[in-house]
Image (cartoon, coloured by chain):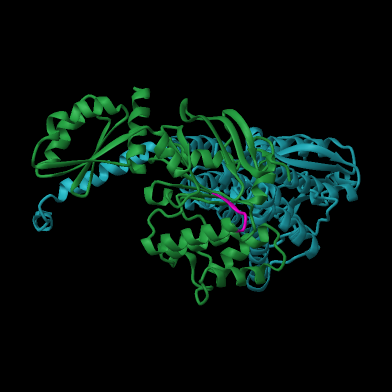
């Protein structure tokens, strides 16, 4: 140490000290930045700490009872007792069974077939079907993996079930839309949304603050151009860039990872464009709120983190507590993750996705409205 | 055309406060079509704020008026189409070329054949050969020229130029003023703010603003005449030492060195004469009554205005 500092020019510490002092004064002047340094980590710790759950419980499950029997009811009761499943829906035929899974209303659907009880008594080892929506492998795999063992324990002492040491019936699991449970099938669509969110936010978050900081905003305001025109003009180029980026990620996903695109590519392109525009509008709104580029970047990051962690990409959406799910409905990525998984892996149509589509469009409108009203036409 | 339309700027009682502090107070002014109106005053006197209120970039807290016949409070959009505003700080895009900057402006204003109009403007500005140069790399003089070109490109009726010659060399300043005069000859009105006194003499009319108040206005001769200022020029040995003594004397409003001379001014001739009487017969000094310069007048005005504030 002393060998190193011994060679320092006289006054080294005084100059470093002066610099440190100046940096603190500047930091203190920028109140917003100072406040974010303190409050954001706290907020996020609380938000994510309580919301994120890697072993989700109470996942919504539909049941199709082809026969009404004590055995069936007992099994369903036991399944619910595992806490992993929560029966939220009774369906009445196989078409409905498929539909509730496809729409994403439930994550699991259980079918107890006709003649199940009789087959059980005969020792025929009948099967119940547990179909899972495996577009989110994290959410489904834990529950499916433990189902057999837990049921066996739970039903051992139940008089309705013949005791033979082993389960007298078979649980036939069916991981729909991603039978191999390949994580790429989740990662590629998810990353597409995450990367688009990040880049689109940053692009526009800087756009207005940059004009203000460089002094070009003053002459722009003195020109006959309206705030709405400025906003559209600043968003449109990035819609094209975002579209190019999305195509690139998607192309790589198909070529390198063999991710299927089951649904309509045109629909995927259209809804991706909507998602891109929504993020651009939000970034632009930050840009009208921030006083400088640093603040704009911080706002973008603050918005990006919950998008990544709470949208259902990194952790199961349905595994979060209700308040966190409600909160996440306000994040565009939540809706886009559903859309992109549904189109690519399930082949869903616009009819299945109208809620998420409307939600995205609504968020875009809200952001644009705030941006245009917040955008100051004068320097007052 | 009615007489009213010959008045391009007509505002009354403009007041603007920032955080409760009045930056411009009760300012009224009229500017006739085709004049070059010099807007003088020290830094922070409210020149920029006034200009911004005229083109609708700031809303006055009090007062009203018209610019080009449009209400400055409610018709800012119409004013913007016919006003060329050159900001104090270079406000074109530093990362666009000369041509790209001008074409952007041309397209915003909806000029027919933007490419052609820009080509002509580049020739007029003498920027040919530099069309593709990035604006940020231009020298100060060229930047200012480009900025002027950008505000005249849409064919405005009024130019609002906020300290256009700050930090520009004398040759570029002269060329700039020649250009302003050429434009005024074509009927364009220009309001030019500056704190260079020599530039005031190039204006048809001037107004002097300090501490947010318009202190005087008129032609240069009118302003000097109406100041009722008497100025002595004194030179000789020990004149600078005299400066400190005179400054404190009653009847002397300002003392300012001009080269080896000292200008001693006062609004009350009798009091001024009494103040300098002890030194008039000093053989080492030579005294003469001169016509006050604009600077003497303004420094005198500023002194008075400041007193009003204290």
Residue B298 falls left or right of residue B234: right
- Palette colour of chain B: green
Of residues B198 and A82, the one drawn nearer to the viewer in this rendering: B198
Q: Is residue B91 left or right of residue A260?
A: left
Q: Position of residue B136 (x, y in %)?
A: 45, 64
Chain A: colour as depicted: cyan
Front in this rendered view, residue B144 or A107: B144
Q: Residue furthest bottom?
A: B129
B187 within the magenta span: yes
Q: Position of residue A177 (x, y in %)?
A: 75, 59
| Residue A67 inside the magenta-drawn segment | no
The structure residue drawn at horizontal position 60% and vertical position 44%, both measured from the top left corner, is: B32
Which residues are the magenta region?
A: B186-190
- Residue A26, position in %: x, y? 35, 41
Residue A359 % position (x, y) = 74, 44
Q: Nearer the viewer, residue A109 or A8?
A: A8
Report the side of A35 relative to A170 (left or right): left
- Vertical placement of residue B44 versus A166, above or below: above
């Amino acid at each position: 140490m002393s060998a190193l500092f011994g060679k320092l020019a006289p006054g080294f510490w005084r100059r470093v000290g002066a610099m440190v002092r100046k940096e603190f004064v500047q930091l203190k002047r920028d109140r917003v930045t100072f406040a974010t340094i303190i409050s954001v980590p706290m907020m996020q710790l609380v938000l994510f700490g309580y919301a994120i759950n890697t072993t989700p419980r109470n996942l919504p499950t539909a049941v199709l009872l082809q026969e009404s029997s004590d055995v069936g009811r007992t099994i369903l009761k036991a399944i619910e007792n595992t806490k992993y499943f929560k029966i939220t829906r009774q369906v009445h035929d196989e078409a409905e069974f498929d539909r509730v899974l496809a729409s994403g209303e439930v994550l699991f659907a259980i079918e107890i077939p006709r003649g199940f009880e009789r087959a059980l008594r005969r020792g025929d080892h009948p099967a119940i079907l547990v179909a899972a929506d495996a577009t989110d492998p994290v959410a489904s795999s834990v529950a499916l993996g433990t189902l057999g063992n837990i049921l066996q324990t739970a039903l051992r002492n139940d008089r309705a079930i013949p005791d033979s040491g082993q389960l007298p019936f078979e649980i036939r699991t069916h991981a729909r839309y991603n039978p191999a449970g390949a994580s790429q099938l989740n990662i590629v669509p998810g990353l597409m949304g995450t990367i688009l969110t990040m880049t689109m936010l940053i692009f526009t978050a800087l756009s207005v603050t940059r004009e203000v900081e460089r002094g070009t905003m003053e002459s722009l305001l003195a020109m006959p151009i309206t705030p709405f025109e400025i906003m559209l003009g600043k968003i449109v180029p990035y819609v094209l860039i975002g579209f190019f980026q999305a195509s690139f990620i998607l192309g790589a996903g198909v070529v390198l990872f063999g991710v299927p695109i089951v649904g309509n590519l045109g629909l995927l392109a259209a809804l991706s464009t909507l998602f891109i525009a929504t993020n651009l509008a939000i970034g632009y709104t930050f840009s009208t709120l921030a006083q400088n580029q640093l603040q704009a970047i911080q706002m973008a990051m603050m918005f990006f983190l919950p998008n990544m962690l709470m949208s259902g990409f990194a952790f199961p959406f349905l595994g979060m507590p209700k308040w966190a799910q409600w909160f996440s409905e306000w994040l565009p990525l939540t809706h886009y993750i559903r859309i992109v998984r549904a189109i690519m892996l399930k082949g869903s149509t616009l009819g299945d996705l109208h809620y998420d589509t409307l939600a995205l469009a609504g968020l875009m409108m809200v952001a644009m409205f705030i941006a245009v009203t917040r955008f100051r036409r004068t320097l007052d | 055309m009615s007489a009213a339309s010959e008045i391009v700027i007509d505002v009354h009682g403009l007041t603007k406060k920032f955080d409760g502090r009045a930056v411009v107070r009760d300012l009224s002014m009229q500017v006739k079509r085709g004049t070059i109106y010099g807007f003088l005053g020290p830094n922070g006197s409210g020149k920029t704020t006034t200009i911004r209120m005229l083109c609708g970039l700031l809303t006055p807290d009090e007062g009203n008026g018209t610019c080009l016949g449009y209400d400055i409070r409610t018709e800012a959009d119409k004013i913007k189409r016919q006003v060329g505003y050159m900001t104090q700080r270079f406000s074109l895009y530093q990362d666009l070329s000369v041509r790209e900057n001008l074409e952007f402006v041309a397209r915003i204003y909806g000029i027919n054949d933007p490419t052609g109009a820009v080509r002509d403007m580049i020739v007029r500005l003498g920027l040919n050969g530099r069309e593709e140069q990035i604006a940020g790399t231009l020298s100060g003089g060229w930047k200012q020229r480009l900025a002027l070109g950008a505000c005249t490109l849409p064919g405005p009726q009024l130019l609002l130029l906020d300290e256009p010659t700050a930090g520009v060399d004398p040759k570029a300043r002269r060329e700039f003023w020649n250009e302003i005069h050429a434009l005024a000859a074509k009927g364009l009105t220009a309001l030019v703010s500056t704190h260079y006194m020599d530039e005031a003499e190039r204006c048809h009319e001037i107004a002097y603003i300090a501490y947010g108040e318009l202190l005087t206005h008129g032609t240069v001769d009118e302003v000097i005449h109406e100041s009722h200022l008497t100025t002595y020029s004194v030179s000789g040995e020990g004149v600078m030492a005299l400066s400190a003594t005179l400054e404190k004397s009653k009847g002397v409003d300002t003392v300012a060195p001009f080269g080896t001379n000292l200008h001693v001014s006062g609004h009350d001739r009798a009091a001024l004469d009494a103040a300098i009487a002890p030194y008039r017969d000093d053989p080492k000094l030579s005294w003469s009554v001169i016509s006050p310069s604009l600077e003497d007048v303004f420094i005198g005005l500023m002194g008075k205005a400041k007193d009003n504030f204290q």
